[in-house]
Image: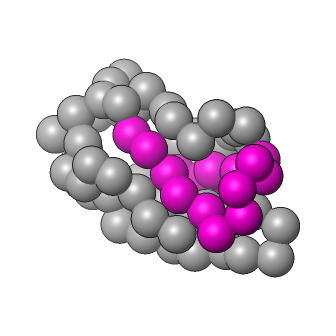
């Protein structure tokens, strides 16, 4: 599972080993506050509204789950 581009300034893509599977995306600020929860069918999100900073992203799809760092510029 991956996030790209990273760092990002807006449009962000998410990958999952299972193709055509909905993704559960949770984004947390570095202090642990959840700033986004969304279930998406298309692995693309516009994160341009988020303030600049470092975030933790939890990506889940079926039996797979990963946490990645994301830098927003």
Where are the magenta residues, as a range? 12-27
- Percent of width and height locating residue 14: 50, 51
Q: Which of 20 and 51 is in front in this view?
A: 20
Query: Where is residue 34 drawn, in percent x and y?
Result: 57, 50
Give left or right: position of 9 versus 22: left
Residue drawn where x is 58% and y is 42% of the image: 43
Left or right of 55 on screen, residue 21: right
Provide residue 64's location: percent of width, then percent of height.
72, 75
Q: Residue 36's image quarter?
A: top right
Quadrant of the rendering where the C terminus is positioned: top left
Q: Residue furthest top?
A: 49
Can I make out residue 17 in this image?
Answer: yes
Q: How is the image coloured?
A: one colour
Q: Which residue lies furthest to the front in this view?
A: 19
Residue 25 on the magenta span: yes
Report the residue at 53% width, 57% height from top.
15
Residue 35 at x, y percent in the picture: 53, 42
Q: Which residue is farthest right?
A: 62
Quarter where residue 13 is shown: top left
């Amino acid at each position: 599972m991956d996030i790209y581009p990273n760092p990002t300034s807006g449009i962000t893509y998410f990958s999952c080993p299972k193709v055509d599977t909905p993704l559960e995306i949770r984004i947390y600020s570095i202090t642990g506050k959840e700033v986004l929860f969304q279930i998406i069918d298309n692995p693309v999100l516009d994160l341009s509204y988020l303030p600049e900073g470092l975030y933790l992203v939890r990506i889940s799809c079926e039996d797979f789950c990963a946490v990645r760092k994301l830098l927003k510029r």
